[in-house]
């Protein structure tokens, strides 16, 4: 996952990779004793971020549901830009992320 973005928030380490419509998310919590690490891969139908300075919330929507996670604003912007610039395995110009209704 050469294009993966990694950050931590409140003891949870997030690692997200976007390739076309495929997103891979891994979350680990090193301080947990039960090793509650997990990962998921999903096909993205929409993605956007909310936030202005520093901290943001990244929302990912797939056919099976949606997920919102805390994410530093610069990383959220890069992930949304990477997703919106592709369609499957090819880059296109007309695809744009969903506008945030409540900035």
Image (tube, rainbow, N blue to C red):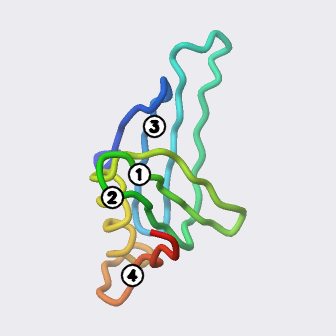
**Mark identifier at residue 52:** 2
- Crowding around mark 2 (Cα neighbors within 10 Å: few <14, some 14 to 19, many 20+) is few
> Mark 3 falls on what kind of element?
strand
Q: Which mark is residue 33?
A: none
Q: In the picture shown, does residue 69 fall above or below 91?
A: above
Residue bearing mark 4: 96
Circle 1 sits on which residue? 56
The residue indicated by pointer 3 is 14
Label 2 – label 1 distance at C-alpha: 7 Å
Gap in angstroms between the C-alphas marked 1 and 3: 14 Å
Question: Which residue is outermost to the bottom?
Answer: 94
**Residue placed most toward the observer, 6 or 91:** 6
Tell me, yes or no, whether the two marked residues, 4 and 3, touch with CB atoms within 8 Å: no
Q: Earlier in the sequence, mark 4 or mark 2?
A: 2
Q: Position of residue 60 (x, y in %)?
A: 54, 61
Quarter of the image with the C terminus is: bottom left
Whole-number angstrom distance, CA of label 4 to CA of label 3: 24 Å
Mark 1 in CB contact with mark 4 (< 8 angstroms): no
Which residue does the image show at 38% across and 65% down from the upper left? 80
The answer to which of 94 and 102 lies nearer the viewer is 102
Q: Residues within 10 Å of mark 4 (few under 14, many from 20)?
A: some
């Amino acid at each position: 996952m050469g294009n993966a973005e990694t950050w931590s928030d409140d003891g949870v380490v997030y690692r997200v990779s976007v390739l076309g419509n495929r997103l891979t998310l891994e979350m680990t919590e090193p301080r947990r004793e039960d090793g509650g690490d997990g990962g998921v891969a999903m096909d993205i139908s929409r993605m956007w971020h909310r936030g202005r300075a520093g901290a943001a919330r990244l929302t990912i929507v797939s056919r099976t549901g949606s997920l919102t996670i805390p994410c530093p604003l610069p990383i959220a912007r890069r992930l949304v830009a990477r997703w919106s610039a592709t369609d499957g395995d090819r880059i296109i110009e007309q695809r744009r992320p969903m506008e945030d209704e409540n900035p």
